[in-house]
Image (cartoon, rainbow, N blue to C red):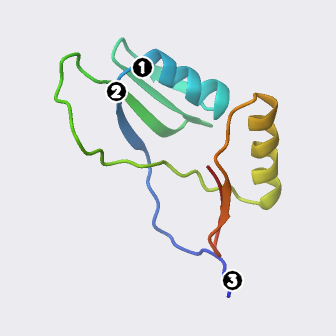
Amino acid sequence: MTYEYQSHIYLAEAVLNVKDLVSQTVFYQQIIGLEILSQTDTEVVLGLGGKALVHLIQAQEGGEVREHYGLYHLAILLPTRKALADVLKHLTDLQIPLVGGADHGYSEALY
């Protein structure tokens, strides 16, 4: 049974501690298509249309090394199947490797 996802709950902004601020900034700009909204030497906020979506923070060198990580993946919900197809074409054109796809009943995903 399929149904339309109608939740009014959403994240306003994902805050991620990253080892390499430069490469992660490039990823979110060039691969995902976000624009830099604000930037310092240790933090970058990216988004679209002035709305912050991802906040990257440079992790401190020599910081705590964890055996378990809390974030497995970050999902971006697109408004239509056409938008998902456009993203797939964009990733394919950039030769970004994909692991697969899934239909969750309420949304479809690329991995």
- Residue 11 vertical placement versus 23 (above, below): below
Identify the residue at image location x=76%, y=28%: 94
The amino acid on which the numbered mark 3 sits, given as a three-letter code, is Thr
Identify the residue at image location x=61%, y=56%: 77
Identify the residue at image location x=18%, y=23%: 63
- Between residue 49 and residue 6, name the one nearer to us: 6
- Estimate the spatial distance between the alpha carbons at disc 2 and disc 1, rounded to whole Å: 7 Å
- Between residue 61 and residue 68, name the one nearer to us: 68
SS class, disc 2: strand
SS class, disc 1: helix
Which image quarter: residue 66?
A: top left
Identify the residue at image location x=33%, y=17%: 42
- Residue 81 vertical placement versus 14 (above, below): below
Image quarter (top left, top right, bottom left or bottom right) of the N terminus: bottom right
Which residue is denoted by mark 1 in the rendering?
A: 21
Which image quarter: residue 13?
A: top left
Which residue is denoted by mark 3 in the rendering?
A: 2
Percent x, y of residue 46: 51, 31
Percent x, y of residue 90: 78, 36
Percent x, y of residue 54: 47, 37
The amino acid on which the numbered mark 2 sits, given as a three-letter code, is Ile
Labelled disc at residue 57: 2
The amino acid on which the numbered mark 1 sits, given as a three-letter code, is Leu
Residues tagged 2 and 1 counted as in contact (Cβ below 8 A): yes
Q: Earlier in the sequence, mark 3 or mark 2?
A: 3
- Between residue 4 and residue 102, name the one nearer to us: 102
